[in-house]
Image (cartoon, rainbow, N blue to C red):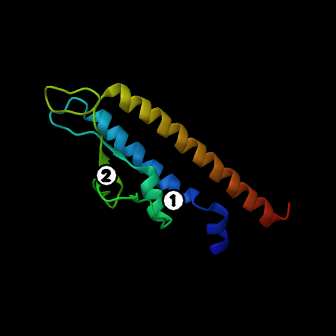
């Protein structure tokens, strides 16, 4: 099993995070008309860095250069800051959500294609081709 994990690398974890991000963006779009709904997104870089156990925290050269940033929840969920305010308190902006969803879908498909090629290469190696 370790051989398969080495062959797939971080892309298996990346596919899971990208799939979850597509779900979150779809929830945002579905709740575009819900009063007081707060748009959310997943910080892909921070989640993947945590999965790889890399330190993604900022370090200051002097105290007071910046305040403590927003804490990352265990699943990487963060609330999005809207460009425009809304009267009903909803922070979903359809143009932003649709653009993010399109990009996330393309990223997901690219990762899926990479994994399919990698599995195909392993399959060929096992067959001796």
Q: Nearer the viewer, residue 22 or 127?
A: 22
How crowded pointer 1 is (Cα within 10 Å; few <14, some 14-19, many 20+) is rated as some
Q: Which residue is mark 2?
A: 66
Position of the N terminus, as image quadrant, is bottom right
The quadrant holding residue 37 is top left
- Which residue occupies the extreme front position in the image? 62
Position of the C terminus, as image quadrant, is bottom right
- Which residue occupies the extreme right position in the image? 129
Q: Position of residue 115 (x, y in %)?
A: 63, 53
Q: Residue at x 47, y 58 (%)?
A: 48
Q: Which mark is residue 79?
A: none
Establish if 42 lies above or below 128: above
Question: Left or right: where does residue 120 sit relative to residue 88?
Answer: right
Q: Nearer the viewer, residue 28 or 81?
A: 81
Establish if 18 lies above or below 100: below
Q: Position of residue 118 (x, y in %)?
A: 69, 55
Q: Is residue 1 visible?
A: no
Precedes in sequence: disc 2 or disc 1:
1
Q: State how far apart marks 2 and 1 are (Cα).
A: 31 Å
Q: Position of residue 73 (x, y in %)?
A: 30, 58
Q: Nearer the viewer, residue 23 or 42?
A: 42
Q: Is residue 104 visible?
A: yes
Q: Position of residue 8 (x, y in %)?
A: 63, 61
Question: Left or right: where does residue 6 sit relative to residue 15?
Answer: right
How crowded pointer 2 is (Cα within 10 Å; few <14, some 14-19, many 20+) is rated as few
Q: Which residue is mark 1?
A: 13
Establish if 28 lies above or below 76: above
């Amino acid at each position: 099993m370790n051989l398969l994990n080495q062959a797939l690398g971080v892309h298996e974890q990346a596919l899971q995070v990208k799939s979850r991000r597509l779900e979150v963006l779809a929830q945002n779009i579905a709740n575009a008309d819900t009063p007081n709904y707060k748009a959310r997104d997943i910080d892909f870089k921070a989640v993947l860095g945590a999965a790889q156990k890399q330190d993604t925290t900022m370090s200051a050269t002097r105290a007071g250069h910046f305040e403590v940033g927003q804490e990352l929840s265990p699943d990487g969920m963060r609330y999005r800051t809207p460009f425009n305010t809304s009267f009903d308190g909803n922070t979903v902006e359809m143009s932003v959500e649709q653009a993010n969803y399109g990009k996330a879908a393309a990223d997901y498909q690219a990762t899926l294609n990479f994994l399919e090629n990698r599995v195909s290469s392993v399959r060929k190696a096992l067959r001796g081709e």
